[in-house]
Structure formats: C-alpha cells, structure tokens
Image (tube, coloured by chain):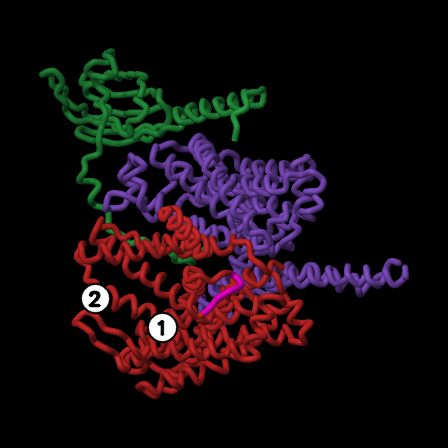
Chain colours: A purple, B green, C red
Amino acid sequence: MTLQMTKTQKLLRFLANNTVPILFLIICAFGIPLSGYSANYLVSEILVRIVRNSFLIISLLIPILAGMGLNFGMTLGAMAGQIGLIFITDWGIVGIPGMLLAMIISTPISILLGWWCGKILNMARGREMVTSYIIGFFMNGIYQLIVLYGMGVVIPVRSNSLLLPRGYGIRNTVNLIGIRKSLDNLLTIRVFGISIPLVSFLVIAMLCLFILWFKKTKLGQDMRSVGQDMEVARAAGIRVEHTRIISIIISTVFAGYGMILYLQNIGTLNTYNSHMQIGMFSVAALLVGGATVAKANIRNVFLGVILFHLMFIVSPMAGKNLIGQAQLGEYFRVFVSYGVITISLVLYEVRKKRDQAQVGLALASEQEAGA
Amino acid sequence: MKLIVNKRFWVRSAAIIVILAFSVFLFFIGRQHTILVDNKSITINETEFQPLQLVEVQINKQPPLELAARDRDKYEATGQKHTVTIMYTDKTWEEHVIVRTFKVPLMQDMLIISIPALVGNPDSEQSVWLENYELPTYAMTAQPAEEHVVTDDFAGLI
Amino acid sequence: MIVNELTSSVKGFIKSFGLPRVIIGLFLLLLFVTAPFVGVNVGTSLSDTLNRFGMNAVMVLAMVPMIHSGCGLNFGLPLGIIAGLLGATISLQVNIPGPMSFVLAILFATPFAVVLGWGYGQLLNRVKGGEMMIATYVGFSSVAFMCIMWLLLPFSNPTMVWGYSGRGLRTTISTEGYYLHVLNDFLSIRLTSHLVIPTGMILFFAVLAFIIWAFLHTKTGTAMTAVGSNPVFARASGINVDRVRTLSVIMSTWLGAMGILVYQQSFGFIQLYMGPFYMALPAVSAILIGGASVNKASILNVIVGTFLFQGIVTMTPSVMNSMIHTDMSEVIRIVVSNGMILYALTRKTEAVR
C-alpha cells in the first residue's frame, strides 16, 4: 500500500528536505542588493572561492559515505599540508615543483594522522562527530608543539626568515610568494573581464571524477554498506573497522592537498590559525549545499560553496548599508555559519527519529494486518 | 603487521621508490636561488678588475638589468643551470657580448657574480667570477618582535 | 609476595582511576615538588591555584546535572554563560555600585537562565543521541548571535559603552567599583604574606555544591539519575523523562550563569563578544579529569577535577618558565584538556544509545 502524495505534499516534502539551501537563497537574495556589489565583482569572487575551497569540501564526502558523519578531523590533513608547505618554503622550492613536493611531503603525515584519527573514532562508536571535533583541537596542540617549539630546535630549519626572533618556532605568517598562484596562473582565460584559472578547474574536475569512480569500486561500495548498517556489512564479510579507517585516511590526505591548493591561491600561510577555521567553513559550506550528516554528493559541494561564500562576501557590506556598522555584518555571517551547522544537525537528528518512528509504525501495522 | 614479501610488496616498494626519485627531481628543478650581479671593483690573485661604466646583464630569459659602476642588483632563478649574458660598450666604442653558462650548487641560497671579473676573464671557469654569498647577520635583527595569537579564531576570516 | 600484591593493587587503582588521571595527578605533584627548587614560591602558587579553583568550580559544577540525566557533557555551557553576562550587564546598567550589584546580577541572570535553559532543553529532548554535537554548535551560534546583540542593545552606562559613539558595549568591561572581589575578600584568610585563601568564593561554591548534592538525593534528583542510567526503566516507572531532562538543562544553565558571575568578580572583567566562545572546553575537561565519565559524575569529581586542572594551568607556566625559560603552558593546556576529553569519549559506556 503506497501513499500517494499530492502536489502540495510533494512541495512541502521538497521544502523540508532542502530547508538549509532555501534559507540561504533567501538570505543571499536579500543581501546581494543590500550590499551594492556589482554582478561582475561577485562572479569573479565566487569563482576564486570555488577554486580555493572545492577540493577541501570534496574531501569531506568520503567519510559521510562511510557513515562517519562530518569529518571535523580534516583539520589534521590541513596541518599536514601546512607542514609540507613550511618545508618547501624553507628549502626554497618554488612554482609547481614546490607545490607538488609539498603534496608529496604531506602525504605520509596525512596517512599517519588519518590512521590514528580513524582508530580513535572506531573507539568512540556513535559519537564520531564530537570526537573528530575534539581530535582537531588536540592535534592543534601537538601541531603547535612541533611548529612553535620543535622547528629550529629538533627539526632543522635553514632559513632564518621563517623563524621567530627568539631563534626557534615558525613565524605567525609565512610568505608563500614562491608558489603563489602557481597552479592558477598556469593557464588562464579571460571571459567578460573575469580571469578563469583553467588548470585549477581541471584538477577539481579530476577529483570529482575520481570520487564518482571511487563510489563504484569495491572499496566504495564497502564503505556505503558500512555507512548504511555496520552489522549487516560485518555479516557480509566486510572488515568494518578497517574500511572506516581507510575512509578517514583518504579524507585526510585529500584535505592536505586541498589545503595546499587553498594556500597557493591565497599566497600567505597563517601558521597557527588557518587550519582551525578551514574545518568549520568547509563543513558549513557542505551543509549549506543541502548535504546531511548521512548523505552528500558533488552537487551539494558546489551549490554549497556558491551559496555560502556569496553570503560571506555580501554580509559586511549589507550590514553596513542596513544598520551602519560593517562589524555587524561580520558577526552576522559568523552567526549564520554556526547557525546553519546547528540547524542541519538538528534537522538530521529529528528526521532520523521520524524515519525510525515511521519504520516502527509500518512494522506494527504489518503485524496487525498479518494477525 | 607481518612483512609478507610477495608481488604486491614489490609493486608497492617500486612505487615508493619512484615517488622518492620524483621528489628528488622536483627538488632539483624547483630550487630557487637568488643571484646577485655585482659591478664593484674586485681583487683576485692581486689583479684588480675595474668596474665598468655601464653594462647590461641578463640571466636566462628574464628582463635585462642595467648596472652602473658600483651597482648591484639581484635575480631570482629557478633550477641548477643558468646562462648569463653581458652586453657592454668598452672604451673603443665596441660592443661586446659575453654569454656564459654556469651551474649553481644545490643547497646554496644566494650567489654573487662579479661582472668585472667575468669581463676580465671571459673564458675562465665559473669559480673565478661566481661565489657563494651569505646574508650578513645584521640583516636578520631588523625583524620586529611579535606575539603569536594562539586561539584567535576569527583573526583572518576568509 | 608482598611485591606482587602491591603491584596488583597499584594496577587495580590505576585501572579504576584511569591511567591519564594518574599521570596528570603525578605531573601536578611533580610540579609542586620542583617549584621551590626553581625559585617559585609555593605559597603564591597554592594561593593562585585556590583562587582559580574558586573561579572555575561553579562552571564545572554546571556539568553535573546534565551528565546525571544522560544529556552528556554540556558543551553548550556558553548559553548559561550568556545568561550570566546578560545579568551582569543589566546589573551594571542599573548602576548600583558595591556588593549589591552582585546580588542584582544573580537576580537578573536567573530568569534568562531559566528561559534559555528551557528552550535548550526542549531542543535537546528532540535530538536524543546527538546531544553533544548539537550542544557545541548551539553554544557557538548563541555566542555569535549575542555578538550582534551586544552591539545593538540600548545600554548607556559610560563604563560599559564605547567612548566615541556611545553605542554598543565594549569588549571587556571592568567590574571595579561594582562587584570586584566581592566574594574573594569576604572572610578571606591570610595565612602568610604569600598565601591568601579566598574564603568567600569557596564558601559560595560549597553552598551551591551542597544544594546540588542535596537535590540529587531528593525524589526528583533520584529520578534524574534514573533517567540518565536507564531511560526505558525510568519511563516504565512513570517518570516524565523529557521533563526531568529539561529540568537538568535549566539547572545546568543556571549554574553556568552563576559560574561566570563568580569568575568575573574574581577576574575583574566582564568578557563579552567572543569571550565565552571556548569556555565550555576547560569545564568539560576539568570534570573528566576529576573522574567523571560521559554519563556518571559526582561532586567529588568536580572538586578533584577543578583542582587538578587549575593546578596544572597555574603551575606549568611559572615552573616551566623558571626551568627552561620557555612558556609552553598554552600548548600543554591544550594537549592536556583535549586529551582528557578524548580519553573520556573513547571509553565504552554502559548506556550507549
């Protein structure tokens, strides 16, 4: 006995399932005219943001596939990428070779951190998201231990310009002038006065293709079954713990590469702060695109980047024109960023309960019909 | 984890070796050096070479620099092998062009080419006119002391 | 034979207490022992530790009701802190200087705490199972929201608002002239020239702790514990699980408000805007260091945990600075507190939903 839904029910269902993106569309629809930015400016800014952030956000897709929720532990990958960049800046390697070398250096570090993170998440079954969140903070402490106290003392650093005046520890900001925009500037075309970095888009497109291909492989299918039901997967002979750890490792490695791409676009490394913010922004952007804790695809990534960063760009100006204080707009966008994560998490839990209740009701009615 | 030596093991080891070799290759082609070109008088083996009045220097294919007497300028060059092209007009109003290639040691950050020495001995080996250069330490103390902010979450909202 | 018994009893002790806690306890002991040898005055250190203990203990106490009722670790403590901040700012706006302002702050904070706690509790009731993550983000969102509010709300007391525009609150507001050290100096005992015991503050904490302890032994309190340990059984016994959980959240929020007021009177400043953002983490890790788990906590955990945590936070900078002339305290604090939370999150618990 299937329930036929009327048009209005279908519309309501659509609205309910896509609350967050629609909410964001409304905010942007208000904010863009208020801010007074030209369409040209906004389009070029959004393109830059897409190039910068997509890789990082795509790295979040695989843990969601494997049922690990939102991987706040991508911070660990970001740290690995940053360490790679510190080394190549120290050694004076520039351009594409520098970027590639940073990626190669970051990979074993990411694998190690991802493996450790996956092991801990396996020990905290049912609480993966909070645990990955705290792991990010914990590793921040270890990262500081290495970068603020170890570099220059235990780890040899050649160039003095990288170190703090006291002689050890990396400085607050590291100038990545050597690799700045090296990937972006490889091949650009100008369309309507907006320059589009083709190679970067190509790299992102290749990553999307990789994700699509990966979902069809045996490992990808294993992860999906683990994500849907761990016990069923275990009964089917899948090594559940091993698969979960692999999903975190892949995510961390990609987060490392994504961080390097992000930083080569910006050109400056904020040694002690970049990696902490990036986790929150990537998660928020993914959720804005309509992803949930249990389901996310490439569409969500790009929709999310566009909507989230549009809101981000127009808020300060909109706040200034609306109330007279740009500071208000900045606080507003912080509030919205956190608020959207809160709403998404709440909706996910509520919907999960509702689905479980419906399954229970369906089961009960079947039993009654059978009896 | 036991170490099982089978085909998989060899393939993986080969892959790792390839990546390592590739990394070393990247290191070589990506290493950037700062090359100073110097037009000051210089004394080698008790022979003094005078600076030239006006000389044009070019490293690889980068835009050429003009140096007057006692001038010094710098280039950033990536890689190990480079070409230096010098064009100058001497007292007899003749134009001379000297082209030399040279190799830079891998781990050296800065080097200095002495133009007078090169012009004086156009065919000598590179150690005559090319030297390693260390930045004098007084240049380092000009950095301001800074406090790092540890948990400033929104310092650089991007 | 005796050696065997000794090692097995030591092992048993370590197992029940938890290896990280033993390590932390020994580390703190080590710091105190080395202090006099590196020129750090033990009296001052003890005094500082006691001071910080008093400052933070109430906020750690706020963790207890929610852990008892099964809502997990209260990462949403910033919500209670905001209620306290609202009470403090309104009390300063009313502008009655002296100790009375502290009483007023408590009076003003309470209705905010109850209302916010009630709403927060309703939300948590609908998301059973994912409370901790949502609590974290509710806390963050509310701090960010209040940032907007602090700019817009019509405060006018000159000590509070920005000088130029006269609108919008400053980031930090001094409590001097109002309730600075109101509790600290109340009945404080001066043992030596270096060692001062802030009796008033500790008494305040003791009173609150006693109230909570007594509450947990009342009928409602035992219902709360039942809901936390076995919600199905509690519902079968006729307890309204949702109501009890909401009550625990309200209590926790109110204690958070009280906690920030105690903290402010000792610290000397009201910290607005992004100040309360990360304040849940030290409280959470303190109670975990004291022996609590995600669904079991006692007042003893609060006392022991706060003392150990604040002891480390106080002693590490001074001792380490004198020893190796490096200030690693921030990093050690991050590693210790987050490591402790990680340890607690990865324990196998009895009531896993």
Tell me which segment is drawn in magenta: C294-298
| Amino acid type at image mark 2 | Gly
Horizontal side of A187 relative to C11 (left or right) equals right
Q: Against A156, is C58 above or below?
A: below
Q: Nearer the viewer, residue B1 or A162?
A: B1
Q: Against C209, is B97 above or below?
A: above
- Residue bearing the label numbered 2: C43
Residue A346 x %, y %: 62, 63
Tag 2's secondary structure?
helix
Q: Nearer the viewer, residue A84 or C125?
A: C125
Predominant secondary structure, magenta span: loop
What residue is at 44 percent from the left and 41 percent from the top?
A80
- Residue bearing the label numbered 1: C263
Horizontal side of C77 relative to C118 (left or right) equals left
Disc 2 and disc 1: Cα gap in Å? 22 Å
Are discs 2 and 1 less than 8 Å apart at CB?
A: no
Label 2 lies in what chain?
C
Horizontal side of A2 relative to C74 (left or right) equals right
Residue A55 x %, y %: 55, 43
| Amino acid type at image mark 1 | Tyr
Q: Nearer the viewer, residue B45 or C174?
A: C174
**Looking at the rendering, which quadrant does residue B115 occupy?**
top left
Q: Is residue C303 visible?
A: yes
Residue A136 x %, y %: 47, 51
What residue is at 59 percent from the left and 70 percent from the top?
C226
Tag 1's secondary structure?
helix
Which label number is shown at residue A371? none
Q: Residues within 10 Å of mark 2 (few under 14, many from 20)?
A: some
Q: Nearer the viewer, residue A316 or C298?
A: C298
